Image (tube, rainbow, N blue to C red):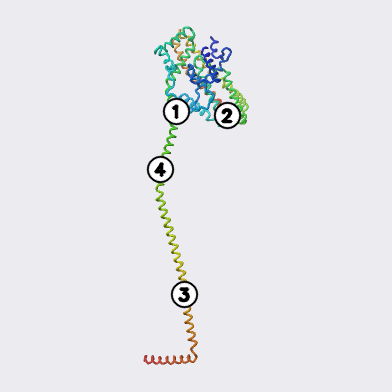
């Protein structure tokens, strides 16, 4: 019954936080359920204040002694009552509750003991491995991000190397241009010489033609003159002269024949 | 004495205010809110991992249309799990021992799956009334049986959860009462009974988790048939 009253009271307080802004710090100190109230009081975003960068999480969670009693209680009581203070408080409280029959031992106590035993056993046995698993989840996230970062770094350093190579190549560009310039000059030279040759050949052909024409002219003149001389000589031979020359030729031939016959004998 | 055994299941009210609303709403405080951090503390990481894994596993056989139900079923799972597990503590009221609550969860969700099936693919949904390969003579009887089976489903869902949890709590109550009564008289028997109580408590922890899971699993199966 008392517990239900407590639950009702904290619910009432929780309902209040929806209508008023209560700073988280004030709520955190509100007793053992303060931590829960912090979550309940996520307030409206009334200002444009940025939430980043997020403040770092504390290194360790809240320190507890014997599993549920916060260390702060012990620190609170230490100045006045020393080390055994909280234990005396606990024992006295328990004795008070039992003797005044505010809390009665009944079957629920035994079921509480049994479920307590099960819970404590489970936490002791599986607690460290579950915590390690949770830590591994976070570490895997970090490793994945780190892997991405590493790949990016490797890629970028490779890009730097390649850029340096490109710069070295760029330095050798002037040699390349000289070679190309030489090539072009040679080409031009070759072309020039070819054209000179062509011009020479053409001119020679023209001159040869002129020579040939002159030669032809002279030849034709010569032939024409010879023909004209022959014609005039043949024309000047009269028939009388022709008969005389033929008779002379016959008499010469006869004389030759007689000479040859006499020789042959 | 007989009356007080079932007193633990009466819906609590204080000054006329029904406290079951508090019992239903306050376990929400125990579930941490995921922060906007990239790396958070262990509890939030574990919770995120668990919910992601569970939802992935549950929705593997469902087609994409059924994935709309993922937030509903995942949050319902967390709800039922928290209620059941918290109810094992002493003096804590378990809302899921109330048939009204369980039927209130089962009937609307089951009805939603049936209506979705009837609306989107009525032929396919009605086809479930006749499994493949039934002999012709059995068809009329089988259709009647399948219809009854369909309408029994929400009742079964609700009553299963109620009965399991109620029975478990009742047993714990009885056996711890037995130990309490036997302790001054026959301590040895009381110790044996206490060992039994311990085993029963472990069983009840398992049952609490399994019953919540079975509720959600069956709903996802009904959804799979119809979506």
Q: Residue at x 47, y 23 (%)?
A: B43
Nearest to the eye among marks 2 and 3: give it: 3
Q: Is residue A106 above or below residue B164?
A: above
Question: Above or below — where is A200 with respect to B168?
Answer: below
Residue farthest top in this picture: A100
Assign a secondary structure to mark 4. Answer: helix
* Residue at image coords 46%, 7%: A99
* Contact? badges 1 and 4 (CB < 8 Å): no
Q: Nearer the viewer, mark 3 or mark 1?
A: 3
Which residue is label 3 attached to?
A214
Judging from the image, mark 2 belongs to the subunit labelled: B
Q: Which residue is mark 2?
A: B225
Using the rendered image, report if marks 4 and 3 lie on a common chain. Answer: yes
Q: Looking at the image, is A228 positioned above or below residue A123?
A: below
Nearer-N-terminus badge (3/1): 1
Residue B142 lies left or right of residue A201; in this view the side is right
Chain containing the residue with disc 1: A
Q: Nearer the viewer, mark 1 or mark 4?
A: 4
Q: Position of residue B119 (x, y in %)?
A: 62, 29
Q: Secondary structure at mark 2?
A: helix
Query: Could you tell me if the residues under marks 4 and 2 are in contact, i.e. CB atoms within 8 Å?
Result: no
- Residue closest to the eye, A259 or A12: A12
């Amino acid at each position: 019954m008392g517990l239900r009253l407590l639950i009702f009271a904290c619910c009432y307080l929780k309902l209040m936080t929806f209508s008023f802004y209560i700073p988280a710090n004030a709520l955190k100190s509100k007793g053992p359920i303060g931590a829960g109230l912090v979550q309940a009081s996520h307030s409206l975003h009334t200002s444009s204040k940025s939430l980043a960068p997020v403040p770092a999480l504390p290194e360790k969670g809240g320190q507890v002694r014997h599993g549920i009693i916060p260390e702060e209680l012990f620190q609170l009581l230490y100045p006045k009552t020393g080390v055994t203070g909280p234990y005396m408080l606990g024992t006295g409280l328990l004795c008070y509750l039992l003797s005044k029959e505010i809390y009665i031992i009944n079957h629920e106590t035994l079921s509480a003991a049994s479920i307590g035993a099960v819970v404590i056993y489970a936490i002791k046995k599986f607690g460290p491995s579950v915590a390690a698993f949770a830590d591994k989840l976070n570490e895997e996230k970090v490793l994945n991000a780190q892997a991405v970062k590493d790949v990016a770094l490797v890629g970028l350093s490779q890009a730097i190397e390649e850029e340096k190579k490109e710069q070295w190549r760029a330095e050798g560009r002037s040699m390349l241009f000289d070679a190309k310039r030489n090539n072009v000059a040679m080409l031009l030279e070759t072309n020039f010489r070819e054209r000179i040759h062509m011009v020479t050949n053409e001119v020679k052909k023209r001159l040869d033609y002129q020579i040939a024409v002159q030669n032809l002219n002279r030849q034709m003149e010569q032939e024409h003159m010879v023909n004209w001389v022959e014609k005039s000589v043949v024309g000047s031979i009269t028939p009388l002269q022709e008969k005389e020359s033929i008779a002379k030729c016959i008499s010469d031939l006869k004389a030759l024949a007689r000479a040859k016959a006499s020789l042959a004998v | 004495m007989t009356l007080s055994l079932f007193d633990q299941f009466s819906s609590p009210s204080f000054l006329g205010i029904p406290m079951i609303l508090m019992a239903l709403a306050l376990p929400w405080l125990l579930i941490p809110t995921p922060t906007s951090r990239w790396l958070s503390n262990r509890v939030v990481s574990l919770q995120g991992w668990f919910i992601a894994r569970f939802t992935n596993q549950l929705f593997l056989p469902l087609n994409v249309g059924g994935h709309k139900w993922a937030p509903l079923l995942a949050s319902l799972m967390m709800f039922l799990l928290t209620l059941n597990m918290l109810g094992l503590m002493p003096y804590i009221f378990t809302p899921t021992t109330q048939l009204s609550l369980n039927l209130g969860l089962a009937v609307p969700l089951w009805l939603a799956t049936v209506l979705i099936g009837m609306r989107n693919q009525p032929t396919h949904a009605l086809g479930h009334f006749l499994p493949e390969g039934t002999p012709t003579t059995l068809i009329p009887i089988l259709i009647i049986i399948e219809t009854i089976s369909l309408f029994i489903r929400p009742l079964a869902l609700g009553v299963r959860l109620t009965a399991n949890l109620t029975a478990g709590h009742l047993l714990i109550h009885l056996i711890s009462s037995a130990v309490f009564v036997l302790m001054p008289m026959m301590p040895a028997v009381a110790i044996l009974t206490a060992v039994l109580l311990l085993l029963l408590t472990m069983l009840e922890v398992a049952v609490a988790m399994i019953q919540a899971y079975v509720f959600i699993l069956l709903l996802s199966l009904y959804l799979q048939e119809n979506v």
